[in-house]
Image (spheres, rainbow, N blue to C red):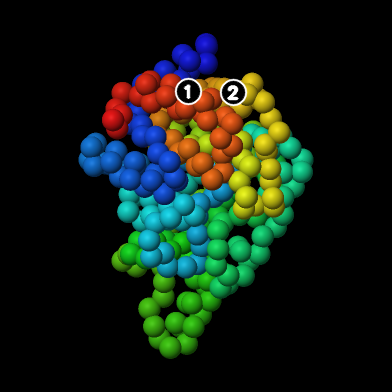
Amino acid sequence: MKYTEKITELFRNSYTEVNKNHDEAVIAFENFCNIHSRNIPVMVNYDTHSDVYLNSKQISVNIANWVNFCCAKLGVIEYYWIIPHYIIQNPKFKRIFETNDKLQQETFQQGAMRAFGSLNDVLKENFLLNKETAEFITVKKINFINEKNKKFNLPLITSEEEGFVPVSLYIVPFDKISVLKNKEIALSIDADSFCNSGHDTIGAINNADISSSDIKNEFELFISALYENNVKIAAASLTRSPAYFPSKFENELNEFFDMVKSASKYQKN
């Protein structure tokens, strides 16, 4: 099947919005939920960054924590961060993401979720989400708090406690995208998942020295992977991220996003 036909098939029943910065994905998915009067339990983010912030109360939505708010406000209980193809295929880039990060190991450390092991397979972490504060709490922190609470006869933090909900977060290398097979999802696509030359990208990853045909090939590889795994896309948020995506490929990106939006049954004008 042709590339354009795969796009049509994947997005024909979707609600789609195109936005500038990634925090606007919360609005896009909220609009879907309001229009269709339902939540989407599974969200997928194709992105160089996880956009998940751990062990800290979140005051307002920004490009680094918007996933917290989707989970807290829109009923997402499974989150899949897909590590882009160009990272998995580049040994130097992949090695940076595979570096063990102490974030998942230290009780009180706060910050963005990063890969915490080998990207030869899917990595999974279970967190407890405080829906009121949009805080993802690591297991180590929960255990520490509960040990203190026991000493003072205070209630323990559990998934049964009102306002707390368990959420599973998956870090998925591109070549393991089959983990999404047959799933209905809310899909977020960040432009930097195809090419990232952003100034503060983790480990100084720079992907600027590629051609127009290379970037188009990245689009096709991603679409083909979704199509081959029969992914059902209920809602899609397409983010340009001009701070991270090189302007020299703006025309190619706009063409791709336009094709996706045009294929979608429901669109924001």
Look at the image and tell me whether residue 145 can be seen: yes
Location of residue 249 in the rendering, given as x and y in whole percent from the top left corner: 57, 29
Query: Total number of numbered labels?
Result: 2
Depth check, mark 2 against mark 1: the one in front is 1
Mark 2 and mark 1: Cα distance apart in space: 10 Å
Locate the C terminus and report the quarter of the image it occupies: top left
Along the viewing direction, whichever of 178 and 100 lies nearer the viewer: 100
Picture residue at 42% right of the left edge, 18% below the top: 8
At label 1, the amino acid type is: Glu
Q: Cβ–Cβ below 8 Å for labels 2 and 1?
A: no
- Residue 6 lies, with reference to residue 114, above or below; the image says above
Picture residue at 47% right of the left edge, 68% below the top: 56
Picture residue at 52% right of the left edge, 11% below the top: 1
At label 2, the amino acid type is: Lys
Q: Residue furthest front?
A: 248
Circle 1 residues within 10 Å: few <14, some 14–19, many ≥20: few
- Residue 50 lies, with reference to residue 226, above or below; the image says below
What residue sits right under mark 2 in the picture? 216
Tell me: 197 left or right of 37: right
What residue sits right under mark 1 in the picture? 255
Location of residue 202 in the rendering, given as x and y in whole percent from the top left corner: 65, 52
